[in-house]
Image (cartoon, rainbow, N blue to C red):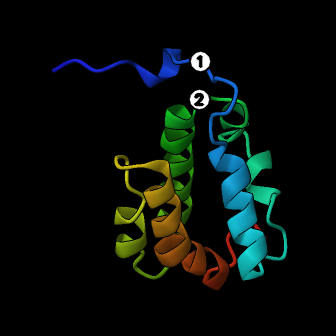
Amino acid sequence: MITSNVFYEVRQPGDINLVTEIVKIFEKIGHPNPMNWINDPMMREAIDAHPKLQRFLINRFWRVQLGLCSESTTRERFSLVDTGTFNEYLSIFEAAVAPSIIKYKLTF
């Protein structure tokens, strides 16, 4: 089954902004520089993108960052889900990914 290509979907008024929501998660859990990650060249395209594309780009970015850690981050990388609702995605990100980003001092 062919689905729509997220690279061509246009952001609509009222769409959730996953970049902003993840910054809020980082602020909530005490990341010392909660916005540093959005300055990375890999993330520039995500800032104003459609939420589906944001999720794709965010997941790509954090999979790369977590994959560079010296300890295993397989669980965290598998927790960067590509499906489900955006609220479920953010809940999983907050519970299973964000704490490791703090632990490994990623994008500090």
Pointer 1 with pointer 2, Cβ within 8 A: yes
Q: Secondary structure at mark 1?
A: loop
Question: 45 or 69: which is nearer to us?
Answer: 45
Q: Which residue is mark 2?
A: 50
Q: Is residue 93 in sight in this rendering?
A: yes
Location of the N terminus by quadrant is top left
Residue type at mark 2 is: His
Q: Which residue is mark 1?
A: 10
Q: Residue at left 67%, top 33%?
A: 14
Vertical placement of residue 2 versus 50, above or below: above
Q: Position of residue 9 (x, y in %)?
A: 52, 18
Which residue is situated farthest in the front direction here?
14
C-alpha span from label 1 to label 2? 6 Å
Q: Residue at left 59%, top 18%?
A: 10
Question: 3 or 14: which is nearer to us?
Answer: 14
Circle nearer the N terminus (1, 2): 1
Left or right: 15 with respect to 4?
right
Q: Residue at left 50%, top 77%?
A: 95
Question: 66 or 90: which is nearer to us?
Answer: 90
Residue type at mark 1 is: Val
Q: Position of residue 43 (x, y in %)?
A: 68, 41
Q: Which mark is residue 105?
A: none
Q: Position of residue 75 (x, y in %)?
A: 35, 74
Q: Residue at left 68%, top 55%?
A: 21
